[in-house]
Every structure is written in C-alpha cells, then in structure tokens.
Amino acid sequence: MNATVEISGKQYTVSEGDKVKVARQQSEVGDTLSFERVLFANDGKKNHIGTPVIKGAAVQTSVLEQGRDRKVLIYKKKRRKGYQRKNGHRQDYTLLQVEKIKLSATRKTAVKKQAEETAKED
C-alpha cells in the first residue's frame, strides 16, 4: 500500500515502513504523528483519489530523529563589477518512519450497510 500525503505544504509518496526526511515538525523523538491530508492512496487493488483529500484517511508516523541537513551554499556574482557574495545555511529536518496507512471505509459500503439494515427492519 502506498499513499501521497501532504506534509508542511510538500507532497511525499510513501509506503508502510518507509523513512521520510521532511521539514522540521514540532515534536520529540519517539512521538507519533498522524497526517490526514492524504491526496492519493493505492491499496493494491484499487486507487483512491481525493478531491482534494481522501476523507477519513491518515498516515501514522513515528519520529526517529531531529537534525540539521547538509550545508547549502548560495553564491551571487555580477560579472565585471567585482560583486561576489557567498552565503549558506543548514536546513532543520525531521526523520519520520511510516508505521501505517489507514483508509476509511468507502461511502459505497456504508450505503450498502444502511440498505441491509432497512431491509432487515421491513
């Protein structure tokens, strides 16, 4: 099973057991996080497409690490002017392990259950 989930404004395609490096989340190592903005999911049999999100779906993750990524260098230069600037920064990140991808029951099965219940009452 895999899913496309939106985390901090960016989209990630994940499967159960994957490790994903995302922008820093406000949590501690060992915490569990749940992301409900699931845009697409495939359970092996059927594709579930959200409009824009799948209602009731969630991706359960656990925090493995909080850290800082490699240094990214920024270099500016204007030719023939003697202008040069070198700058850099290290981006904070959170390493997540995907524990479970949960999909909700589809609307069709809920409608079928209601139809069966009304048939039993009659």
Image (cartoon, helix red, strand yellow):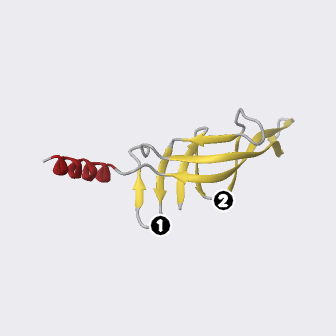
Seen from the viewer's position, the closer of residues 25 and 88 is 25
The quarter of the displayed image where residue 65 is located:
top right
Residues under numbered marks 2 and 1 in contact, where contact means CB atoms less than 8 Å apart? no
Tag 1's secondary structure? loop
The quarter of the displayed image where residue 32 is located:
top right
Picture residue at 61% right of the left edge, 38% below the top:
8
Picture residue at 52% right of the left edge, 41% below the top:
36
Task: Work out which residue is located at the far left of the displayed protein and give it.
Answer: 122
Is residue 63 shown left or right of residue 121?
Answer: right
Image vertical order of residue 38 relative to residue 78, above or below: below
Locate residue 49, reporting x and y percent.
40, 53
Q: Kindly tell me whether residue 102 is visible in this rendering.
A: yes
- Name which residue type carries label 2: Gly
> What residue is shown with label 2?
17
Task: Work out which residue is located at the far top of the displayed protein and give it.
Answer: 26
The quarter of the displayed image where residue 18 is located:
bottom right
Locate residue 101, reporting x and y percent.
55, 53
Seen from the viewer's position, the closer of residues 16 and 87 is 16
Image vertical order of residue 82 relative to residue 17, above or below: above
Picture residue at 23% right of the left edge, 48% below the top:
117
Tag 2's secondary structure? loop
- Name which residue type carries label 1: Gly
Locate residue 81, reporting x and y percent.
83, 35
Q: Earlier in the sequence, mark 2 or mark 1?
A: 2
Image vertical order of residue 37 relative to residue 46, above or below: above
Seen from the viewer's position, the closer of residues 119 and 95 is 119
Q: Kindly tell me whether residue 72 is visible in this rendering.
A: no
Is residue 34 shown left or right of residue 66?
Answer: left
> What residue is shown with label 1?
44
Locate residue 97, reporting x and y percent.
69, 52
